[in-house]
Amino acid sequence: MDGIQIRCLHAIADREIRALSDVLIDCVEGGASVSFMLPMSRQKADAFWRNTSASVDRGERVVLVAEDEAGTIIGTVQVIWAQPENQPHRGDLVKMLVHRRARRRGVGAALLDAAERTALSAGKTLLVLDTASNDAARLYTRHGWQRCGEIPNYALMPDGESCATTIFYKLLRTTGL
Ligand SMILES: CC(C)(COP(=O)(O)OP(=O)(O)OC[C@H]1O[C@@H](n2cnc3c(N)ncnc32)[C@H](O)[C@@H]1OP(=O)(O)O)[C@@H](O)C(=O)NCCC(=O)NCCS
């Protein structure tokens, strides 16, 4: 993790959209089930991040990024704040993405830790997520997330194959964060 920094993007400029799209495209082309199908175009990726940027501007979510020694974005994660009025204490953790060339160095763990701390300081005490990735499921379990169960046939992998999703949650205050 030497030289890797985690920061919160308060606004997402064109330069960041390009870099975030690089990460998203790499993850989808690497087989991650994260909303997109192959072929994964720059246009689809940029449109996703532009919508995300507008959502950040509306105060609905936070976007965290991991940057390498050169300041290049190599990973990202989001927490969605906006919830129904009866769930003000809950956030959804989404789009945990680390570029394949930066994996297995603790970047995912650092992003998760930062997302949990950011959520807790914003008054969130419960985070929820779902994942189709075994790599991600191990990461969440290691960080004290509770596995609720699996929903079969939930989504498609980028190549069109059906996949299940596993739901996880974490109570932030009781886990000593
Ligand atoms: C899931 C994902 C985010 C994990 O990111 P990552 O940066 O590789 O995560 P970490 O480095 O913290 O942990 C990954 C593994 O590397 C190991 N590791 C961490 N630092 C290490 C180091 N310095 N040396 C050796 N191994 C290390 C971890 O123990 C972990 O091992 P495991 O796979 O046996 O459990 C990444 O695989 C990814 O982007 N996948 C595609 C997108 C996706 O499916 N996202 C999930 C959506 S919910």
Image (cartoon, grey):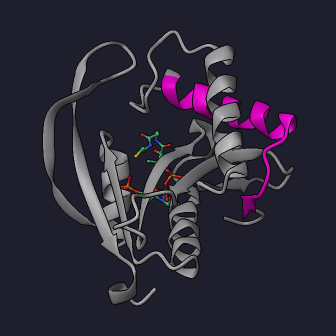
User: Can I make out residue 5 in this image?
Assistant: no
What residue do we see at 46% from left, 85% from top?
177
Residue 85 in the image, given as x and y percentages of width and height: 40, 64
Magenta range is 7-28
Nearest the viewer among 159 and 10 is 10
Name the side, left or right, on which 97 lies relative to 139: right
Q: Residue furthest top?
A: 39
User: Can I make out residue 81 in this image?
Assistant: yes
Name the side, left or right, on which 141 lies relative to 139: left
Residue 153 in the image, given as x and y percentages of width and height: 16, 27
> Does the magenta run of residues contain 10?
yes
158, above or below 152, in the image: above
Residue 2 in the image, given as x and y percentages of width and height: 73, 66
172, above or below 68, in the image: below
Would you say the magenta stretch is mainly helix, strand or loop?
helix
Rendered image quadrant of residue 49: top right
What residue do we see at 68% from left, 17% from top?
42
